[in-house]
Amino acid sequence: MRDSTKTEKRARGRPRAYDADDALSGATDAFWLGGYSGTSLDALSDAMGMNRPSLYAAFGDKHALYLSTLDRYVEAGVLGMQDALRDDISLAQALQRVYDAALALYLPSGEAPRGCFLIGTAVVESKADESVRTRLAQGLKSFDRAFEKRIRRAQTDGELSAEADAAVLARVASAILHSLALRSRAGDSRASLRATAAEGVALICGACNDNASKDASMSGARKQKKN
């Protein structure tokens, strides 16, 4: 009888009424708005649609939950960049696609500017929290690698000089992305930010082509002197 009663209670118990991805999305929004330190467990529970016991059981404590949101954000960001940086369009178009997608995220229509979740929240916590600092560094490097891979493809295709330092150009591309994130949070307009991004794209793509042309001209001049 005792076993039968336990089985009956389990059968009547409510199933887990949350979707993990939706819950993490809600937690991300809460942290994005208030930062890690400024976001209470009550705010997280409300945003995730979960009570505290369910939240702890599913994601651990507040710190573990925050790390999960950082991991999720970086993973989604890298996937989005890989999609934008496709090979069937020019490097300039691909870079602009990344920046346009970023601006759509940083400046959501009808909402207050929110910038980049990783930079906006993790930078503050990284000084005292090694786990956050590690994720911040890994996230930034992941974005660098995505840019570098596409830049190297542009070199292979002859769009950019083979002499250009792809790793440095990738960090420049990332720096533009970080600037958009910070300035959008500070209140710069979408138009001014997109203009900044466009100039950055021209700098990355044009400077390398100019260098390639100069190298070719210098090489030609040296040959003429020898003749």
Image: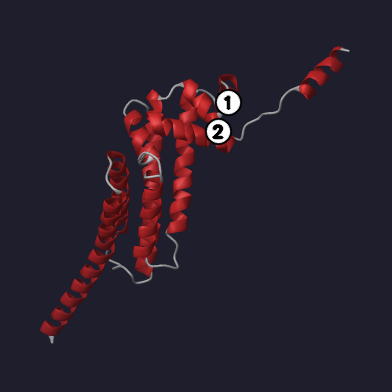
Amino acid type at mark 2: Ala
Q: Is residue 59 left or right of residue 95?
A: right
Q: Is residue 168 visible?
A: no
Rendered-image quadrant of the N terminus: top right
Q: Residue furthest bottom?
A: 227
Query: Do the numbered discs 1 and 2 sit on residues whose CB atoms are within 8 Å?
Result: yes
Counting from the top left corner in percent of width and height, residue 146 is at 41, 53
Residue at x-position 45% and y-position 31%: 30
| Residue 32 image point, x, y percent | 41, 34
Q: Which residue has dot 2 on it? A: 23
Question: Where does the C terminus fall, quadrant-wise?
Answer: bottom left
Q: CA–CA distance between discs 1 and 2? A: 8 Å
Q: Where does the image place residue 14, in percent across and percent down from the top left?
A: 71, 25
Front residue of this view, candidates 51 and 160: 51
Q: Residue furthest right?
A: 1
Among numbered discs 1 and 2, the one appearing first in the sequence = 2
Where 115 sits versus 204, above or below? Answer: above
Q: Is residue 131 visible?
A: yes
The circle on residue 38 is: none
Q: Element under label 1?
A: loop
Mark 2 Cα-neighbour bin, 10 Å: few <14, some 14–19, many ≥20:
many
Which residue is depicted at the point 54% across and 24% down? 60
Q: Circle 1 is placed at which residue position? A: 50
